């Protein structure tokens, strides 16, 4: 399953921050600054400035202002909630969780804080705890669609696909036009092998979230995995029209074109994706795979090296580098790359076949992993 989204973001359908300000302007910010110069200890003014900056997209400055307000007066559950939302949007999930809990200490019945706390647990990888939180909410609010959707997402991540579909169906009873719920339902159906139903769900998600490219990408990715490249390309073209600046759109479009044998165009799509996200190791490795299939091994190796510059513990990058070096006849170098693949843990179950090959290569050309770190 894909990540459940960013807390507070409209496309994720999460509980939103309450907006109490008029449309923001630099002039309004100047006015608040002038008042703060006269009253620097005014918690309400710091909160107002923080809200204004958040609406302007200046998240780090907003965080600083809301934190300052709470230093002066830590008794506002709404400000703790707002702080948590901003922290989660910035990827500071540990801090966000603490802020939502502070809001709940002040108001244990703050439903939005409870929902966002549960989402934060899920996004932190604490799926079981998140599911328990969503189910606690549902015990009190059985008609809360966000809680049903969150429970469905967690159940799917735990491999409980039928339970997940039930929960998502309940969410749709209460919010039948929620795009994110339809999208999550599409992923559940795809994992159950119900491809046509999955496509129908992705299309409903696209209809209700008409400016969101993600359902079209999800449909395309599923079809690529099934080898249905021409159909995938049609969905990805729709995604590209909606979001021409999205690297994931161009990456998946490149994969579909490669599957159709249009390799040169596929590489151009991946280059465009890398232009939008130059630090993406995933896109680098997809490009390396295509280049290697064309016999352009030096260029493919360069992609692997750039992926490893981004994340030197990337298991897939070390394994793919070993494969390319092996194709080039550089067996000792390949064995060293495979050794790196072996020492970086954990190894997902899906990589067990690769692990067996790596072990064989290391034994043949190195003999032992003792010089390559802990096993």
Image: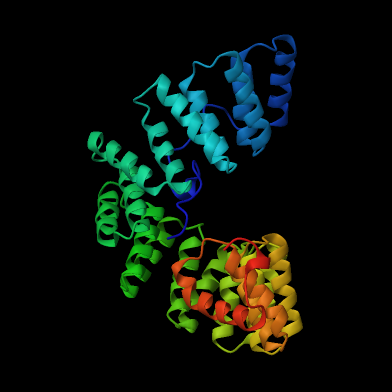
Q: Nearer the viewer, residue 163 or 217?
A: 163
Q: Where is the N terminus found, in terms of image quarters?
A: bottom left
- Residue drawn at x 51%, y 65% as measured from the top left: 347
Q: Residue at x 56, y 72 (%)?
A: 252
Q: Is residue 17 visible?
A: no
Q: Nearer the viewer, residue 132 or 274?
A: 132
Image coordinates for residue 298, horizontal then vertical, percent: 76, 82
Residue 125 visible within the image: yes
Image point 29% across, 61% down: which residue? Answer: 161
Give how far across and how far down residue 319 sits, in percent: 61, 74
Please tell me in which quadrant of the rendered image residue 200 appears.
bottom left
Q: The C terminus is located in which quarter?
A: bottom right
Q: Position of residue 41 (x, y in %)?
A: 66, 11
The image shows residue 227, relative to residue 100, as above or below, that is: below
Task: Residue at 38%, 64% (x, y): give it.
Answer: 187
Q: Is residue 13 left or right of residue 67?
A: left
What coloring was used for the rendering? rainbow
Of residues 241 and 80, the one drawn nearer to the viewer in this rendering: 80
Q: What percent of the width, then of the height, locates residue 204?
A: 37, 62
Number of marks present in the image shown: 0
When asked about the image quadrant of residue 301, the answer is bottom right
* Left or right relative to 189: residue 69: right
Relative side of 295 to 243, left or right: right
| Res 194 quadrant in image | bottom left
């Amino acid at each position: 399953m894909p990540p459940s989204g960013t807390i507070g973001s409209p496309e994720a359908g999460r509980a939103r921050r309450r907006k109490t300000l008029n449309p923001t302007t630099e002039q309004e910010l100047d006015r608040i600054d002038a008042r703060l110069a006269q009253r620097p200890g005014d918690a309400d003014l710091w909160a107002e400035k923080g809200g204004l900056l958040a609406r302007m997209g200046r998240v780090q400055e907003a965080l600083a202002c809301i934190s300052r307000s709470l230093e002066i007066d830590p008794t506002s559950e709404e400000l703790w909630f707002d702080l948590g939302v901003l922290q989660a949007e910035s990827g500071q999930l540990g801090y966000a969780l603490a802020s939502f809990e502070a809001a709940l200490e002040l108001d244990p019945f703050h439903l939005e804080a409870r929902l966002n706390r549960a989402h934060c647990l899920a996004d932190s990888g604490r799926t079981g705890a998140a599911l328990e939180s969503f189910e606690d909410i549902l015990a009190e609010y059985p008609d809360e669609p966000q809680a049903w959707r969150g429970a469905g997402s967690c159940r799917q991540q735990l491999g409980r696909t039928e339970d997940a579909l039930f929960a998502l169906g309940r969410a749709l009873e209460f919010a039948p036009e929620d795009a994110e719920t339809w999208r999550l339902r599409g992923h559940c159906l795809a994992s159950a092998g119900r491809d046509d139903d999955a496509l129908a769900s992705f299309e409903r998600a696209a209809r209700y979230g008409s400016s969101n490219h993600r359902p079209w990408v999800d449909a395309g990715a599923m079809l690529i995995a099934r080898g249905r490249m021409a159909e995938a390309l049609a969905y990805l073209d729709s995604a590209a029209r909606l979001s021409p600046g999205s690297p994931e759109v161009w990456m998946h479009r490149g994969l579909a074109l490669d599957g159709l044998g249009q390799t040169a165009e596929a590489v151009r799509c991946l280059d465009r994706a890398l232009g939008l996200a130059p630090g993406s190791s995933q896109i680098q490795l997809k490009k390396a795979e295509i280049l290697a299939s064309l016999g352009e091994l030096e260029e493919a190796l360069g992609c692997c090296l750039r992926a490893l510059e981004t994340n030197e513990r990337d298991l897939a990058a070390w394994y793919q580098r070993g494969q390319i070096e092996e194709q080039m006849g550089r067996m000792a170098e390949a064995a060293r790359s495979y050794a790196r693949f072996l020492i970086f843990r954990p190894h997902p179950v899906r990589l067990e076949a690769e692990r067996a090959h790596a072990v064989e290569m290391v034994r043949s050309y190195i003999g032992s992993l003792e010089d390559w770190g802990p096993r």
